[in-house]
């Protein structure tokens, strides 16, 4: 790693930092035209958040070339190549690059590459106040701002392994050195997440040095990681980290993307343009957490006032759902449980015949507000679990201290129920109870399914029986209880009795809740009983 390299780029890039990128390329071509590619998200974690130096993130060979990827702060980069590492003869490749990726289409074999980037000039968050005073004020009230103080409290303020995540730019030129020498760089500040900002503060009109706005979880994962607080590792292994299918098509980016794409949801929350072409990002840290400020919520169950960096409260008792056709800003309710923002039934209705209810009715099951009961049946009250102070978080985000690398801490960000400590406050043998409840509901689900199959093969209209067999009761796109790619068409669905449609709706609501009765056992039983009775009425005809 060397400093003071002349980058030869335009504007303010007179000094740069370079990092060696060792790529052995087995191609025998001679020219080096560089073809810039689109900007990529940060794909690796770095202590401190946003890298202050160019960091190689990947390379791959393509037809007649190689693609290089790197990351770092905003500004121009330049790629160099050499045939060996001894002669020191480095040649430039293409033009200065703002995109942090380049495709080199003609290269020598066994080439080495290095990337030169803008030198990291840190200034401290105070320089941001002239234009971003509101954000700065709220951010300074968060725990991030006091990150160095947490080290001082335990006598680790000089620990070089801790300082990158508790200060700004530690170990880099112009970064934090000590509380006495660089007090303006103490704590976690704007530049940890957005990159060095001194050049931007000095010349706000230079768009090439505007600090990056990066929502990828890798920014947070640079610090919220490791055996003591493996938040990033747990999240990365969870379903929240993935995207089920391409969210960029216009038919999905807003409707499905509001819950399946972290990028789309943030755009909707901020009333900004949808990230067309860039929606395939899972539910990231900033989807649920607001790094710029703290929020005050009154707990819906206990009345306790919470102050934290969650965008939504941990509990609510209002029924809520958001359909894919709803205009987001018209229906969004910031006071609804943070999990329920997406884990709601999305307007599921028994009269719909295209496909089963979505796999997301958990909040409504807790409140007993989804599913059908026979006419005249009294409404069920919310489940006991729905009245827990922190609702979903109580069981799905339990935490535990670790004891080193062999037994890491648990932060709850896998969102799985992996321990039962919270349950023992009410249940003496929670694991046995869970086993009993899930086994019982699973059996009842299969029993209702058996009844529906019997109706399909003995009582369904002959045309449906002949054509579909056991699928005659199913939706046009069958649910996971059935095998087969197609059920009765939309026109043929009219031949299915309402009782069968109500029964299958209840069946899939219970199944797609996913807890097999743990969320709301009594209500799940009531829904399955109603389903079984409706099918029995049709079998008796």
Image (cartoon, grey):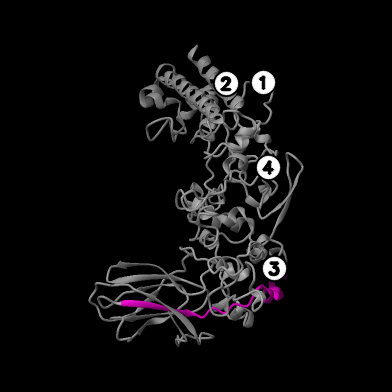
According to the image, label 1 marks what residue? 377
Residue 62: in magenta span: no
Location of the N terminus (image quadrant): bottom left
The label nearer to you, 4 versus 2, is 4
Q: Which label's residue is closer to the chain start, 3 or 4?
A: 3
Residue 107 coordinates in the image, percent (x, y):
28, 77
The label nearer to you, 4 versus 1, is 4
Asked if marks 2 and 1 touch (Cβ < 8 Å), the reply is yes
Asked if marks 4 and 1 touch (Cβ < 8 Å), the reply is no
According to the image, label 3 marks what residue? 136
Q: CA distance from mark 4 to mark 2?
A: 29 Å
The answer to whether residue 438 is seen in the rendering is yes
Label 3 Cα crowd, 10 Å radius (few <14 / some 14-19 / many 20+): many
Label 1 Cα crowd, 10 Å radius (few <14 / some 14-19 / many 20+): few
**Residue 70 shown left or right of residue 171 in the figure:** left
**Residue 223 drawn above or below residue 496:** below
According to the image, label 4 marks what residue? 315
Q: CA distance from mark 2 to mark 3?
A: 55 Å
Q: CA distance from mark 1 to mark 3?
A: 54 Å
The label nearer to you, 2 versus 3, is 3
Q: Which label's residue is closer to the chain start, 4 or 2?
A: 4
SS for callout 4 = loop
According to the image, label 2 marks what residue? 530
Residue plotted at (52% across, 55% down): 232
Q: Which label's residue is closer to the chain start, 4 or 1?
A: 4
Q: Which label's residue is closer to the chain start, 1 or 3?
A: 3
For the record, the magenta segment spans 112-133
SS for callout 2 = helix
């Amino acid at each position: 790693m060397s400093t003071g390299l002349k980058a030869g780029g335009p504007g303010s890039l007179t000094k740069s930092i370079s990092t060696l990128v060792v790529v052995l390329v087995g191609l025998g071509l001679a020219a080096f035209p560089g073809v810039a590619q689109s900007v990529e998200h940060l794909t690796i974690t770095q202590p401190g958040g946003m890298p202050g130096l160019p960091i190689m993130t990947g390379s791959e060979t393509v037809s007649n070339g190689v693609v290089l990827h790197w990351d770092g702060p905003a500004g121009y980069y330049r790629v160099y190549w050499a045939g060996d590492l001894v002669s020191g003869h480095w040649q430039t490749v293409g033009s200065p690059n703002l995109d942090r990726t380049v495709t080199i289409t003609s290269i020598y074999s066994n080439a080495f590459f290095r990337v030169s980037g803008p030198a990291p000039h840190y200034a401290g968050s105070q320089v941001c106040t002239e234009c971003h005073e509101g954000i700065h004020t709220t951010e300074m009230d968060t725990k991030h701002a006091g990150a160095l103080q947490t080290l001082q409290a335990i006598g680790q303020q000089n620990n070089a392994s801790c300082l990158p995540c508790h200060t700004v730019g530690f170990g880099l030129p112009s970064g934090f050195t000590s509380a006495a020498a660089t007090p303006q760089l103490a704590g976690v500040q704007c530049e940890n997440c957005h990159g060095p900002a001194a050049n931007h503060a000095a010349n706000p009109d230079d768009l090439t040095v505007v600090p990056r706005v990066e929502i990828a979880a890798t920014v947070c994962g640079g610090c919220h990681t490791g055996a003591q607080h493996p938040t990033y590792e747990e999240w990365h292994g969870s379903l929240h980290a993935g995207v089920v299918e391409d969210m960029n098509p216009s038919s999905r980016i807003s409707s499905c993307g509001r819950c399946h794409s972290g990028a789309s949801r943030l755009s909707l929350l901020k009333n900004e343009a949808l990230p067309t072409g860039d929606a395939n990002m899972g539910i990231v840290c900033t989807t649920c957490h607001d790094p710029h400020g703290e929020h005050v919520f009154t707990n819906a169950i206990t009345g306790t006032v919470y102050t934290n960096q969650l965008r939504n409260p941990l509990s609510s008792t209002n029924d809520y759902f958001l359909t894919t056709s709803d205009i987001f800003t018209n229906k969004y309710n910031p006071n609804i449980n943070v999990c329920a923002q997406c884990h709601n039934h999305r307007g599921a209705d028994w009269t719909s015949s295209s496909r089963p209810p979505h796999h997301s009715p958990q909040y409504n099951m807790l409140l007993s507000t989804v599913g059908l009961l026979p006419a005249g049946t009294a409404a069920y009250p919310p489940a006991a679990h729905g009245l827990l102070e922190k609702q979903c978080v109580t069981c799905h985000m339990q935490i535990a201290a670790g004891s080193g690398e062999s037994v890491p801490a648990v932060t709850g960000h896998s969102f799985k129920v992996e321990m039962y400590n919270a349950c023992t406050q009410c249940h003496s043998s929670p694991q046995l109870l869970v086993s009993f409840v899930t086994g019982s509901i699973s059996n009842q689900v299969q029993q209702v399914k058996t009844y529906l199959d019997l109706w399909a093969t003995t009582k369904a209209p002959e045309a449906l029986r002949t054509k579909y067999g056991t699928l005659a009761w199913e939706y046009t796109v069958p649910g996971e209880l059935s095998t087969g790619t197609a059920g009765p068409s939309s026109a043929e669905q009219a031949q299915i009795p309402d009782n069968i449609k109500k029964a299958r709706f209840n069946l899939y609501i219970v199944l797609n809740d996913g807890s097999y009765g743990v969320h709301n056992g009594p209500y799940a039983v009531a829904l399955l009983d109603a389903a079984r009775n409706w099918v029995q009425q049709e079998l008796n005809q």
